[in-house]
């Protein structure tokens, strides 16, 4: 039944639920296909191992990238496991959908999907009756934020021997614990409103005329947003691969900064400022 189901998913037709897929196939009955999807018990671990081995053979290596991202599947109803009002990037708004954490191994212009795990919102994990009705396994009922799922998937891919030189992710993961939980090189996005300092910002010891003497060093300048920092940077256009509408390109600038994510500290007349953290 698995080849028939996969063929139905990637084949023609707009409706991808069991009944129309069985009707389009002709050789597979609705009852057999529905039983495979609804109550079939099989272990995906062996299939995942074969997938990871093939992906590493095709594009793995020190020059490969492991890309972490979200994938949203819009849903009309609320009965699909994990379906809830969430942000859908393809629609640019919140909508009823399933959200999955995806891992893609890429080298050059060749991307290969190596991981896809469903995210269960708290509206699901806090409702045992709903989980029972949907048949969610006991070991998948605990609430996990998407960065936790991503770290577990990265560990799984590494344990399988998949080779990559760097992990890439957007700001949704850059502000989480994922970067600190990784061993090796990684590149994560940050929001344009994130406050930063130049990498060579100096820490000075403030001298005051009155009051208690200061006990901590402070940055010599005020932090500014990442957007303001890049407005004065020199940009260049980079093209990375050909898409369906031609070459994909964008303008890039590189600036060494220190993220203002340290402990808060009042700095003269600037008010409370977060001190500089590690250089990025």
Image: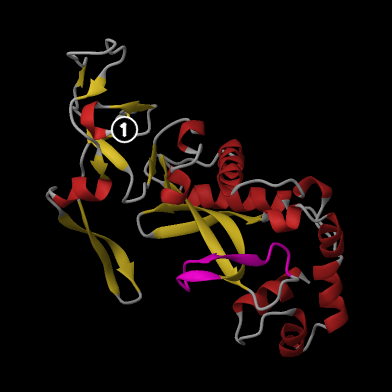
**Quadrant of the drawing holding the N terminus:** bottom right
Q: Going 19% across and 15% down the picture, which residue do you hit?
A: 208
- Residue 88: image location, x then y, percent: 52, 67
Determine the image quadrant of residue 166: top left
Residue at point 72%, 49% (across, down)? 45
Which residue is drawn at the image coordinates 51% and 36% (left, top)? Answer: 177
- Magenta segment range? 80-94
Q: Nearer the viewer, residue 239 or 214?
A: 214
Residue at left 69%, top 62%? 82
- State yes or no: residue 247 in magenta: no
* Label 1 SS: strand
Q: Which residue is mark 1?
A: 273
| Quarter that holds the C terminus | top left
**Callout 1 environment at 10 Å: few (<14), some (14 to 19), or many (20+)?**
many
Instruction: Give above or below for 163 relative to 231.
Output: above
Instruction: Give the image location of residue 53, x and y in percent.
Output: 58, 47
- Residue 210 as seen in the image, left or right of residue 116: left
Residue 226: where, in percent of width, then height? Answer: 26, 46
């Amino acid at each position: 039944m698995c080849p028939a189901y996969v063929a139905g998913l990637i084949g023609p037709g707009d409706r991808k639920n069991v009944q129309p897929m069985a009707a389009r196939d002709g050789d597979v009955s609705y009852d057999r296909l529905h039983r495979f999807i609804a109550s079939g018990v099989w272990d995906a671990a062996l299939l995942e191992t074969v997938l990871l081995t093939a992906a590493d053979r095709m594009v793995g290596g020190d020059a490969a990238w492991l890309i972490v991202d979200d994938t949203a599947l819009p849903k009309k109803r609320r009965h699909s496991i994990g379906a809830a009002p969430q942000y859908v990037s393809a629609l640019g708004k919140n909508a009823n959908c399933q959200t999955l954490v995806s891992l893609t191994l890429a080298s050059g212009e060749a991307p290969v999907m190596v991981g896809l795990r469903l995210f269960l919102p708290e509206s699901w994990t806090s409702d045992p009756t709903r989980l029972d009705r949907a048949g969610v396994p006991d070991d998948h009922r605990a609430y996990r934020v998407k960065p936790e799922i991503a770290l577990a998937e990265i560990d799984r891919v590494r344990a399988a021997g998949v080779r990559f030189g760097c992990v890439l992710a957007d700001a949704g993961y850059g502000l989480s614990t994922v970067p600190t939980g990784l061993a090796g090189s990684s590149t994560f996005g940050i929001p344009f409103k994130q406050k930063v300092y130049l990498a060579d910002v100096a820490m000075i010891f403030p001298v005051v005329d009155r009051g208690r003497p200061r006990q901590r060093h402070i940055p010599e300048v005020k932090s500014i947003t990442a957007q303001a920092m890049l407005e004065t940077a020199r940009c260049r256009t980079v093209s990375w691969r050909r898409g369906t509408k031609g070459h994909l390109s964008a303008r890039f600038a590189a600036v060494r900064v220190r993220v203002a994510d340290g402990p808060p500290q009042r700095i003269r007349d600037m008010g409370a400022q977060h001190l500089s953290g590690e250089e990025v």
